[in-house]
Amino acid sequence: WDAQIDRFQVSLAPFLAADTPLLPAGNVSGTGTAAGSLTNFDLNTLVANSDLTLVVPDGGADGTVTVANGRWDAQIDRFRLPLSPFVTLPDNIALNPLVNVGKEPLRVSGLLNAITPQTLAANLTASGTVGVQINEGGAVVDATFNRGQWQARIQTEQLPLASLVPRDRLATLSNGLAALNLEGELGATVNLAGNLTEFTPAAIASALTPRAIVEGKLPNQIRLHNLQINDAELDKLIAGSIQVTPEQVSLNLSGQEGSIVGERDEFTVAFDTGYI
């Protein structure tokens, strides 16, 4: 059998597990062609090509999808993905939806019979460049995902420290030895890699830890603009490297411009990874 489909719209809820974040509330519409075998009617014999539009609450995507041999391959030209169903953040951090910012489409593929949070990660491949606005700043992520193994380079600019590291979190990082208040903006380049077994909030949070920082084509660097610790104002720009061991994360920083007292500020900060 084969069919030319002029227009269709399908709810995703019947095809997904109830605990799949966000997607069960969405629907897919588009046009395309499909063909298969009447004598062996299953997903492995289905062949299809389609231009699709995905609509989910506060987001969606446009692209093309090809289905063959039990696999699906998608090329996504535009998308908007709300992150709140996947990431839990403090109330003072405004996290906008993820969007495609690369010159090339986002490419994603996987198995038709493995689209639950527990099975999708083991079969999914994806690559692309995405961006997200976080409060007044933003981040760009260049990432690849290959059947559970992932790597990403994150570049950020103008992220407000007061929102990212609130006072109660600072008390934990300092082991309660000092009352700290941070002001300023953070910029950084960080290379990450790891393994993700399933697409659930708990698994994602477990994967995104300082232990995931690795060496990359661009060095891991941090930049602090207009840094103020309590009442102490430091050089207008402080920058340096990020070093990670299984036990701690070390920031080796020095002033780059705007020295207040005529000498560059230099210091090293080390955090036990168990407290981050």
Image (spheres, helix red, strand yellow):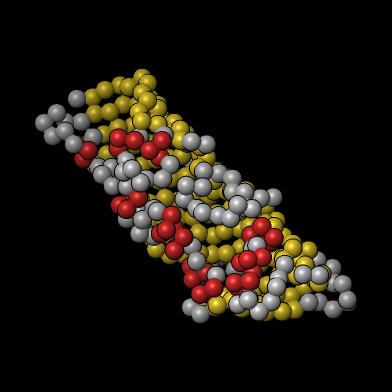
In the displayed orientation, state which residue is furthest to the top: 6
Horizontally, is 233 left or right of 91 in the view?
A: right
Identify the residue at horizontal 45%, vertical 33% (top origin). Answer: 55
* Residue 134 seen in this snapshot: no
Compared to residue 237, the image places residue 50 above or below, namely above
Residue 253: image location, x then y, percent: 70, 75
Assign the N terminus to one quadrant of the image: top left
Residue 29 or residue 152, whichever sits in front? 29
Quadrant hosting residue 9: top left
* Residue 227 seen in this snapshot: yes
Horizontally, is 145 left or right of 172 in the view?
A: left
Compared to residue 116, the image places residue 147 above or below, namely below
How many numbered markers are drawn?
A: 0
Identify the residue at horizontal 55%, vertical 77% (top origin). Answer: 272
In the displayed orientation, state which residue is furthest to the left: 39
Identify the residue at horizontal 41%, vertical 34% (top origin). Answer: 26
Identify the residue at horizontal 46%, vertical 50% (top origin). Answer: 86
Assign the C terminus to one quadrant of the image: bottom right
Residue 90: image location, x then y, percent: 58, 55
Residue 32: image location, x then y, percent: 35, 26
Residue 112: image location, x then y, percent: 28, 42
